Image (cartoon, grey):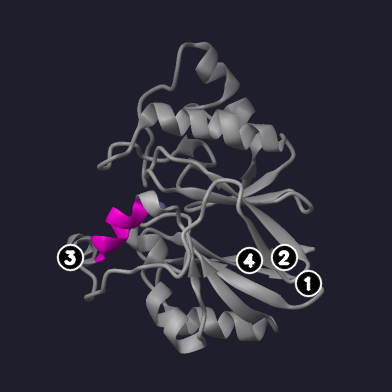
Amino acid sequence: MLRHLSHPVTPLAQNATLIWCDVTGTGAWVDPGADAADLAQIARDHGVRLEKILLTHGHLDHVGASAELARDAGLPVIGPHRDDAFWLDQLPDQARVFGVSEIAPLTPDQWLEDGDRIALGEVTLQVLHCPGHTPGHVVFHDPESRLALVGDVLFHGAIGRSDFPRGNGRELLESITGKLWPLGDDTRFVPGHGPESTFGEERRCNPFVGDAALALGGPAGRGRFY
Ligand SMILES: [Zn+2]
Ligand SMILES: [Zn+2]
């Protein structure tokens, strides 16, 4: 069974999330955005043996500690989809905009495609390519525990921004309604920022992409916050 815990990092309170197989203790950090040493310690505190780093997309608040954690713990960096390569190439510029210390461009050890499978102990994660916030954004889904890690695609009560370079609001809505909703109303998700929710709750109440908002002819304005 997949276990998880989130540890907000950066001034944007990005949910770096430790996931692990509770049978084998094998784990991964999803979106280690900052504080590499803290993240390594949290894994140790929970008896988790880190095996990999998974990235949902190429934004600095999700990626920032990847290279340091990968080097210190000897981990491969997996994801996102290669369409986010231009964001990872621009990490030095992103760091300048955020006013944080210098960071090198990052090339993951493995790019991900829609439909890929990622083994983590006895857990098998499914990869869904969900463009719109960024073109190479991916979501990780564990059908057994009905948990998804959705990065900045969907939040409790909001959706991701689509006004970044190569963002696309129509694609974002298609990713949410076409890829996430079919995973089931009772599927729980960890967003990139803010509290967890379920897809059913968002279909009922989300003012941007809930069933009522879409019935009224589309989202009430563009995504907020992140
Ligand atoms: Zn983002
Ligand atoms: Zn974010």
Q: Is residue 59 left or right of residue 124?
A: left
Instruction: Give the percent coordinates (x, y) of residue 181.
Output: 63, 32
Is disc 1 placed on a helix, strand or loop?
loop
Mark 4: which amino acid? Leu
Residue shown at the point (72%, 65%) measured from the top left: 3
Give neighbour class at mark 2: few <14, some 14-19, many 20+ (Cα, 10 Å).
some
Give neighbour class at mark 4: few <14, some 14-19, many 20+ (Cα, 10 Å).
some
Q: Which residue is mark 1?
A: 22
Q: Residue furthest top?
A: 216
Q: Which residue is mark 3?
A: 96
Quarter the N terminus occupies: bottom right
Give neighbour class at mark 3: few <14, some 14-19, many 20+ (Cα, 10 Å).
few
Q: Which mark is residue 5?
A: 4
Q: Quadrant of residue 133?
A: top left
Mark 1: which amino acid? Asp
Q: Is residue 174 left or right of residue 118?
A: left
Magenta stretch: helix, strand or loop mostly:
helix
Vertical position of residue 49 compared to residue 78: above or below: below
Cα distance between the residues tagged 3 and 2: 35 Å
